[in-house]
Image: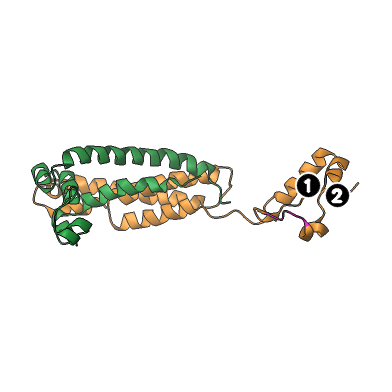
Chain colours: A orange, B green
Amino acid sequence: MPSPIDSSREGTCRTGSQVGSCRRVVITAEEALAVPESALIQERQQRLKPTTEPELSVMAIISMILGIVGTLLVGILVGSFAIWFGILALRQIDGPEQLRGRGLALSGIALGAIDVILWLILILIYGRTLFSPHSASAYWLFR
Amino acid sequence: MATPFAKLILPAAFVMLAMVNVDFLDRMPNLCVYQTLFHVRCLGCGMTHAFCAVLHGQFAAALTYNPLVIIAFPVFGTLATRQFGSFLRVSWDYAFLHRSQ
C-alpha cells in the first residue's frame, strides 16, 4: 500500500502552497483510492499539525501596555481600554488558536482595574474642584 | 475578516476634541482649501470649533462658529456612538474567530 503523502515528492508537487507552517502535498486519484480514507485523513492531519509552539497573543500585549500607560496617567479612558483588551485577549487565548499570554492579559486587566479605582478615588477627593467652571484641570482627567 | 479597529476612528476623534480646548484649535493652522485659495469661508468652516464647543457645553459659542452644527452634531454623534457599539460587538467576535493565517 503506497503512503498517501510522499515526502520525497514534495518538491515536485504542482500546488506547493503553504498552509500554516506545513506544505500541502497533492496525491493522485489512484493513490487516494488505494488507501482507506481514515488513514489518509489521519496522516494529513498529522502533517498539518503545527510544529512550533503557540504564539503570544497580540491583544494581551496591547492590554498590558495600555494598563501600564493608564496607571501612569491616572485616567478613565486608557484603563477601561486595557480591561476590554484583556478580556478580548482571554477570549482569544481560550479560543481555537490556543495562544499564550494569559498572565499578560490578567495583569493588563488588573492594572486597568487599579487605574479605574485610582481615578474614582481621585474624583471622589478632588472632583468638586476639578469639575468646577474655569478649571483647566478637568481635561487632564479624561486620558 | 476585516479588523474592527477602524470603527474606533470616529469615536476617537470625538474624544480628542473633548480633550482639547477651543483656544488650542485657534492656534492650529487652517486646513480648509477654499479659505486658503479664495479667502472665502466655506459651508463646513468652523465645524471643528463648533463640535469642540458642543462637547464642552458651550452651545451659544458653537452656533457662532457654524450654525449647521445643529444638524451635523446629532448625525455624527449618533454615528460615533453606533460605531463604538459596533466595535465592542465585532471585536468580541473577532477575538475568538481571528486566525493569524
Q: Secondary structure at mark 2?
A: loop
User: In the image as oriented, which residue stretches furthest toward the front?
Assistant: B38
Left or right of residue B50: residue A62: right
Q: Earlier in the sequence, mark 1 or mark 2?
A: 2
Q: Amino acid at mark 2?
A: Ser
Q: Give the chain of mark 1.
A: A
Characterize the local packing of mark 2: few (<14), some (14-19) or many (20 or more) Cα atoms within 10 angstroms.
some
Say which residue label 1 marks: A43
- Give residue B14's position: percent from left, percent from top: 26, 47
Q: Secondary structure at mark 1?
A: helix
Q: Amino acid at mark 1?
A: Glu
Characterize the local packing of mark 1: few (<14), some (14-19) or many (20 or more) Cα atoms within 10 angstroms.
some
Residue drawn at 80 percent across, 43 percent down: A40
Q: In which quarter of the view is residue A38 placed?
A: top right
- Give residue B25's position: percent from left, percent from top: 17, 57
- Give residue A53's position: percent from left, percent from top: 63, 55
- Give residue B11's position: percent from left, percent from top: 30, 45
Magenta-highlighted residues: A13-17
Asked if residue A15 lies in the magenta stretch, the reply is yes
Kindly indicate whether the residue at mark 2 contacts the one at mark 1 (C-beta within 8 angstroms): yes
Q: In which quarter of the view is residue B7 placed?
A: top left
Q: In which quarter of the view is residue B70 placed?
A: top left
Residue drawn at 33 percent across, 51 percent down: A78
Say which residue label 2 marks: A3
- B85 or A137: nearer the eye? B85
Residue B24, label in figure: none
The main secondary structure of the magenta stretch is loop
| Cα distance in 3D space between marks 1 and 2 | 9 Å
Q: Give the chain of mark 2.
A: A
Q: Foreground mark, 1 or 2? A: 2
Asked if residue B67 lies in the magenta stretch, the reply is no
Residue drawn at 46 percent across, 47 percent down: B3
